[in-house]
Amino acid sequence: MKRAKKRDIRKIPVRFNYWFDGKARKVTLLPGVPVTFYVGRKTDEGYRTENATLFLDGRKIIEQYRFIQKDCDGLHCDTGERYCLVSKRASRRVAHHLGDRRDRGPLPDFVTTDAEVYDQFAAMAGY
């Protein structure tokens, strides 16, 4: 009788839905292989870019994000890092209507570990 091989849990792909650029994206993460999303577009007063990199660190999903916007008020940057345990990735489901405000945001729920915001207009005004 053959014994079933034990699977190394660190090598199993992790699948989940991730909210980016107004849409829920299907993501499959493999250990050691980061996934990057990027979008950039012109606005009526300047430009905006947004990117996010997802990767596995043990049994955690790590998200590193960066949002940059430049308009008549100057430069605005929002950067940071968040994590979610693999076991918690399905705790939040995509609702029937993704346009509802309560459904916007990253899927699954991430815990912020590092964040930094820079606002050029606020810095010049002395805030």
Image (spheres, rainbow, N blue to C red):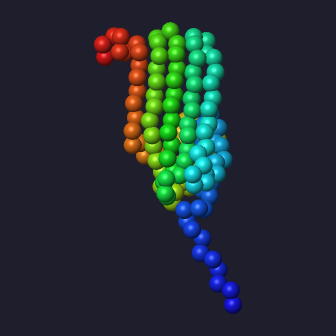
| Residue in the image at 57% along x and 68% along y | 8
Q: Residue furthest left?
A: 126
Q: Quadrant of residue 45?
A: top right
Left or right: where does residue 62 sit relative to residue 5?
A: left
Residue 77 percent location from the top left of the image: 46, 24
Decide if residue 111 is in sight here. Answer: yes
Where does the N terminus fall, quadrant-wise?
bottom right
Residue 16 percent location from the top left of the image: 61, 52
Decide if residue 88 is in sight here. Answer: no
Residue 5 percent location from the top left of the image: 63, 77
Q: Nearer the viewer, residue 54 or 112?
A: 54
Q: Quadrant of residue 106?
A: top right
Residue 3 percent location from the top left of the image: 64, 84
Q: Is residue 16 above or below residue 46?
A: below
Q: Is residue 95 above or below residue 8?
A: above
Q: Residue furthest front?
A: 32
| Residue in the image at 60% along x and 62% along y | 12
Q: Residue furthest bottom?
A: 1
Q: Nearer the viewer, residue 93 or 86?
A: 86
Where does the C terminus fall, quadrant-wise?
top left
Q: Is residue 120 above or below residue 59?
A: above
| Residue in the image at 35% along x and 11% along y | 124
| Residue in the image at 66% along x and 47% along y | 26
